[in-house]
Image: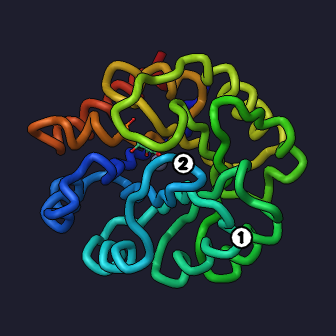
Amino acid sequence: MMSHMKIEIAPSILSADFCNLERDLKAIDHADLVHVDVMDHHFVPNLTIGEPVVQRICEVTDLPVDVHLMIEDPDRWAPEYAKLGAASVSFHMGATHAPVRLARQLHAMGCKACFAVRPAEAVEPIFDILSEFDMILVMTVEPGFGGQKFLDNQMAKVRRLRDEITKQGLDTKIQVDGGVSPATAHIVAEAGADVLVAGSAVYGAKDRAKAIDDIRAKAEDAYRD
Ligand code: DX5
Ligand code: ZN
């Protein structure tokens, strides 16, 4: 059914060694994107990195940089990440005040706009503005930390979203983030996700390249079913 879709794997550097970022970016150079989690101790109970480090990441990697903002006031800060060279910026439903204005502002800067929803947030409220976004991020854990258990109860949401995207004739991507591994890749792809973020499953593995290949293979299997 969804055989035309291409699976993209986005390793999350949240589980990389922050003192060896350049080395750990090289280890994933055959992924499709690099997912960078920005947290502010307010929107989520964790604090990671901000503009100066994201700027260096954009400078040293050849991969498109996918910035996931888990911060308050993304309306204020998201354009700064676009300016630094992010290929896409995700901002949260629970934090943004004017998502359409922000998406258009990012597009005007040549950056893709992605809308993120947490496990308790429904996607239906954004169906009327779906065409404004390049990608919708469905969290499959509560945002804030790597290594949490995958919430399979989010798959119905992914399915409803995929149906709506098809109905509207859009090519919006669906990204899933949290607990994605070779064990869960099949389920998320089967539900209709095409961009898979994986932090601990990639960086927790000895062979990062193999972990990426395994996740990709399991997801592609779902398309062949
Ligand atoms: C969690 C972050 C994720 C995190 C995923 O809030 O948004 O990107 O790195 O980590 P894993 O894949 O270990 O669940
Ligand atoms: Zn993330």
In the rendered image, residue 159, in percent from the top left (x then y), is placed at 68, 25
Q: Classify 77 as above or below 4.
A: below
Say how many tags the image has. Answer: 2
Q: Nearer the viewer, residue 56 or 157?
A: 56
Indicate the amino acid at tag 1: Asp
- Give how far apart the Cα atoms at labels 1 and 2 are: 17 Å
Badge 1 density bin: few <14, some 14–19, many ≥20, Cα 10 Å: some
| Residue type, mark 2 in image | Val
Residue with the mark numbered 2: 44
Disc 2 secondary structure class = loop
Q: Along the horizontal axis of the image, is 31 left or right of 33?
A: left
| Rendered residue at 54%/65% (across/down) | 88
Q: Which colour scheme is used?
A: rainbow
Q: Which of marks 1 and 2 is in front?
A: 2
**Ligand 1 near label 2 (Cβ, under 8 Å)?**
yes
Please give the name of the residue rendered at 22% of the width and 60% of the height, measured from the top-left corner: 18
From the top left corner, tell me how far across and down residue 68 is, in percent. 51, 57
Query: Relative to residue 191, is residue 207 drawn left or right?
Result: left
User: Where is mark 1, residue-wise?
Assistant: 75
Q: Which quadrant would residue 1 be assigned to in this image?
A: top right
Position of residue 152 relative to residue 210, above or below, is above
